[in-house]
Image: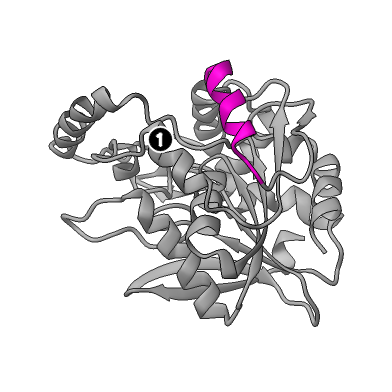
Amino acid sequence: MSDALESLTLDAEGLALHVRQRRAASTPAVLFLHGWLDHSHSFDALLPHLPASWRLVLLDFRGMGRSAHVGPGATYQFSDYALDVDATLNGLGLDAVHLVGHSLGGIVSQAYAAARPERVQSVTLIESLGPAGGPAEGALDRLRSALKDARRPPNRKRYPTVEAAAARLLENSPTLTRDAALYLARHGTEPFEGGVAFTFDPRHRRRFGMGYDEAQWLALQAGIACPLQLLLATGGLRHDEGLMRSRVQALHTLAHPPLHIPGGHHVHMEQPAVVAEALLRLIH
């Protein structure tokens, strides 16, 4: 299925974004947004389970997957990812889409749906309930950490094989299955110094200098006007239980209670048929 998708390069204020799409003659149009340091191929297993009539668009965020890295001296900020969504819709001539976001992609989906309500018809969050910004008193330490990180040269690590890169993913994400790690590594690496390296810009590992505190995030989340659903993995990543409860309660357009699916943080790769079934219930 992934090989049948059309591969495009779109312009985001001079930065080249990589997008894959399956054209369709009718609506709906569905835009998939991947997680941090991942890429659009993380959604490949879902695609065969979705209707042939749907127009599917899969974006690689800037500095990840096959999208371009920002230039020397530049940094990545959270709002940049919303700009990537804007650029994708504009570049493809789409007035509005259904958003499906995993992890970071879900956070971006919520922010974009709040900021551009006229362009988002629904949001499906997979293992994503917003950023862990921490209390207001952590703002100074966050800025200090960002300045410290900026002094560290980006280190692009070489791995002897794709399998070795996959093993590294498993170390960093213990809920990943071995098959999922290998698939992510196969599509997320390129030849480098006689071995392979991940395609993402290592500067993504630097911390943001600014972030939302809880009051700010809830205010943003309150701007979401479209139907929304939340898919959580039984073995996935979690915020503090109290924080999760308050955030779920604050999702005023939640179409139904959160759906709990057996699996890890990349549950859409482990249980694609179940996740696709959830999409079919919300997207029309």
Q: In the image, is 112 to the left or to the right of 155?
A: right
Q: Secondary structure at mark 1?
A: helix
User: Which quarter of the figure is the C terminus placed in?
Assistant: bottom right
Q: In the image, is 30 to the left or to the right of 103?
A: right
Image height of 113 relative to 102, above or below: below
Identify which residue is drawn at 58% across, 70% down: 118
**In which quadrant of the rendered view does residue 131 lie?**
top left
Identify which residue is drawn at 33% across, 37% down: 205
Identify which residue is drawn at 54% across, 50% down: 110
Percent x, y for residue 184?
59, 42
Number of labels in the image equals 1
Identify which residue is drawn at 12% across, 37% down: 151
| Residue ranking furthest to the top | 241
Image height of 236 relative to 109, above or below: above
Q: How crowded is the residue under tag 1: few (<14 C-alpha within 10 Å), some, or many (20+)?
A: few
Asked whether residue 171 is in view, the answer is yes
Image height of 62 relative to 9, above or below: above
Kindly identify the amino acid type of the residue bearing the numbered disc 1. Answer: Ala
User: Which quarter of the figure is the N terminus placed in?
Assistant: bottom right
In the rendered image, residue 262 lying in the magenta stretch gets the answer no
- Give the extent of the magenta segment: 240-252
Percent x, y for residue 46?
77, 50
Asked whether residue 237 is in view, the answer is no
Dominant SS in magenta: helix
What color scheme is it?
one colour
Query: For mark 1, what is the residue?
Result: 215
Percent x, y for residue 254?
71, 44
